[in-house]
Amino acid sequence: MNWGAADTKTTLKKELAIIPAVGWVVAGLVLVVLLTVVTPLLVRTVPPKSGEPVWLLWIVLPFASLICTIWLLMVFYVNADAARRQMNRLLWTLLVIFIPNAIGFIVYFLLRQPIARPCPKCTTLLKAEFVFCPSCGQELVPKCPSCRHAVEAGWLACAFCGAKLG
């Protein structure tokens, strides 16, 4: 098993769990305010143009409120996800907020680093590409004693030189 690729599959439920509780509360409050205060206020104050049905506003505005709430939850997600990947969380949060049309989110998801893993010896959080722990010197990727190529756990022989592993 490749140490850097371990546990890369996640479920939506696990990913949503990293959004902090304050994010869910803020998003819920924003949704409630948008639905109970802003939507009725806009429906009453916007004069209907001739031929436009008012009921259409009652459909479009709640949908827009839901989109705003999902966007806010995504901002909290990026903030928490950047922290667990040892990336600059303030920088990425500001980028996804201020780059329009969801381009900031797309850039974040294209450039994000793998999730940091704890060292098996000292539990320091390490980037996935590390071969040795910088804190304790623990070798993170097992190597063939003969040719020094990386080998996976459970291999009986090295795939590169055929040496017995042990």
Image: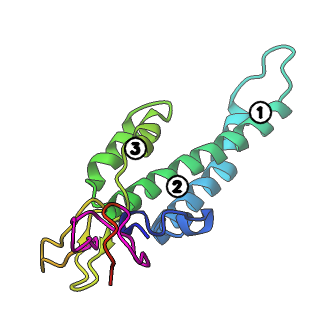
Residue beneath label 1, please? 57
Q: Which residues are magenta?
A: 140-159
Q: Depth-wise, is mark 3 or mark 1 nearer the camera?
A: 3
Q: Is residue 11 magenta?
A: no
Q: Which mark is residue 18?
A: none
Q: Looking at the rendering, in which quadrant would you find the N terminus? A: bottom left
Q: Quadrant of residue 79?
A: bottom left
Disc 1 is placed on an element classified as helix
Residue 108 circle label: 3
- The reply, left or right, for residue 143 in relation to residue 81 is left
Earlier sequence position, callout 3 versus callout 1: 1
The one of 99 and 7 positioned closer to us in this rendering: 7
The span from disc 3 to disc 1 (Cα, nearest Å) is: 33 Å
Residue drawn at x 46%, y 38% as measured from the top left: 106
User: What is the x, y in percent for residue 47?
Assistant: 73, 23
Q: Which residue is mark 2?
A: 73
What type of secondary structure mainly makes up the magenta span? loop
Tag 2, which secondary structure?
helix
Residue 2, position in %: x, y?
40, 66
- Report crowding for label 3: few under 14, some 14 to 19, many 20 or more residues within 10 A (C-alpha): some
Q: CA distance from mark 3 to mark 2?
A: 15 Å
Q: Are marks 1 and 2 in contact (CB under 8 Å)?
A: no
Q: Secondary structure at mark 3?
A: helix
Residue at the spot 18% in from the left edge and 73% down from the top edge:
133
Position of residue 29 relative to residue 143, above or below, is: above
Q: CB of mark 3 within 8 Å of CB of mark 1? A: no
Q: Residue at x 21, y 85 (%)?
A: 122
